[in-house]
Image (spheres, rainbow, N blue to C red):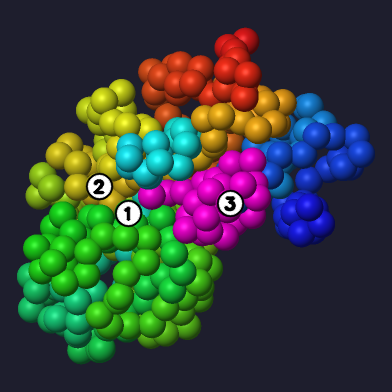
Amino acid sequence: MQMRTRIALIAAAVLGLSGTAQAATTITGAGATFPYPIYSKWAHAYNQQTGIQLNYQSIGSGGGIKQIKEGTVDFGASDAPLGGDDLAKAGLLQFPTVVGAVVPVVNFLGISDGQLKLSGPVLADIYLGKVTKWNDAAIAALNPGLKLPAQDIAVVSRADGSGTTWIFTNYLSKVSGEWKSKVGNDKAVSWPVGMGGKGNEGVAAFVKKTSGAIGYVEYAYAKQNKMITARLQNRAGAPVAANVESIQAACEGADWKGTPGFGVVLTDQAGKGAWPIAGATFILVYRTQKNPAQGTQVLNFFDWAYKNGDDAAVALDYVPLPDSVVKLIHSAWGDIKGADGKPVWTAH
């Protein structure tokens, strides 16, 4: 209990939330780095309105899944959705909160944001170590008229278990048979080449300080930190930039209702304007709550966020969920119960 209290106090300091432990109920969560900015923003506003404090540890999706399974937090957070069998085995219920994207970021002289075009197969070959120079014929063919340097490509990836990596490698596995067979799709993989950084921050730091570098980070992080992003040729053959519109286009037609745990994978979608490396981020809670009152507080917070948090999400470059999906989530919450079998949350 002492360790959990220390963690909560550290996280509270990071989030800079108002209120005191004596005056407010505290909710604890841990996991994905991608939603940290919006969870922090929501937490601050919710604390001001209700006095209830959310302490969220931005430790990566792998850590969030581990902590919720160990029962050291009230909820876990992951950019990589768990499958139906995994959820059932762990006794967990999963639901999405917002949608975002992963974007390639680059650093070489003379390139501006959105100027470089890449395709999925070429991106996979870069990360496989097969395309090693920026003026390689495969890159030059996608960028006629663009002066490309005869410079080595410095490949940067995530060194920690990460939902960002899960989404990125899921995409590479869909567009490259060689990637799928040799490396695969997971929150952490054995990278064929390059260097690793911890979190979006670590990858960004390597890319910024390394001439000729390419990495991948969350769209919101890239935009807020004014990083140079590449356009990607999508499944429809169109070179698209990552933005709210292209990320929303990736959500169109997704089968949220028919996918266990709402675990829709939004990579390589067919829409003409769809950004090809999009993905939702997810919350994990126990179906049977040992502390029903605490479970109620968690769901009340996310209910408030669905109803009041869209403007803040858009301002931070996240894409809110459609109302139809939120209704499905509210319905699913009816399966979250206390040990007495009574639901811990009802619509209000």
| Whole-number angstrom distance, CA of label 2 to CA of label 3 | 30 Å
Residue at 50% of width from left, 72% of height from top? 198
Q: Are marks 2 and 3 in contact (CB under 8 Å)?
A: no
For label 2, the residue is: 267
Task: Classify mark 3: residues with Cα within 10 Å, few (<14), some (14-19) or many (20+).
Answer: few
> Regarding mark 2 in the picture, which secondary structure is present there?
loop
Corner quadrant of residue 10: bottom right
Task: Name the amino acid type tagged 3.
Answer: Glu
Q: Position of residue 51 (x, y in %)?
A: 82, 31
Q: Is residue 65 magenta?
A: yes
Answer with mark 1 or mark 3, whichever residue precedes in sequence: 3
| Whole-number angstrom distance, CA of label 1 to CA of label 3 | 24 Å
Residue at 79% of width from left, 27% of height from top? 50
28 lies above or below 180: above
Task: Name the amino acid type tagged 1.
Answer: Ile
Answer with mark 1 or mark 2, whichever residue precedes in sequence: 1
Tag of residue 98: none
Answer with mark 2 or mark 3, whichever residue precedes in sequence: 3
225 and 262: which is toward the camera: 262
Tag of residue 70: 3
Please report the bounds of the magenta region as a residue range. 57-80
Q: Nearer the viewer, mark 2 or mark 3?
A: 3
Q: Is residue 232 left or right of residue 34?
A: left
Q: Are marks 1 and 2 in contact (CB under 8 Å)?
A: yes
Task: Classify mark 2: residues with Cα within 10 Å, few (<14), some (14-19) or many (20+).
Answer: many
For label 1, the residue is: 167
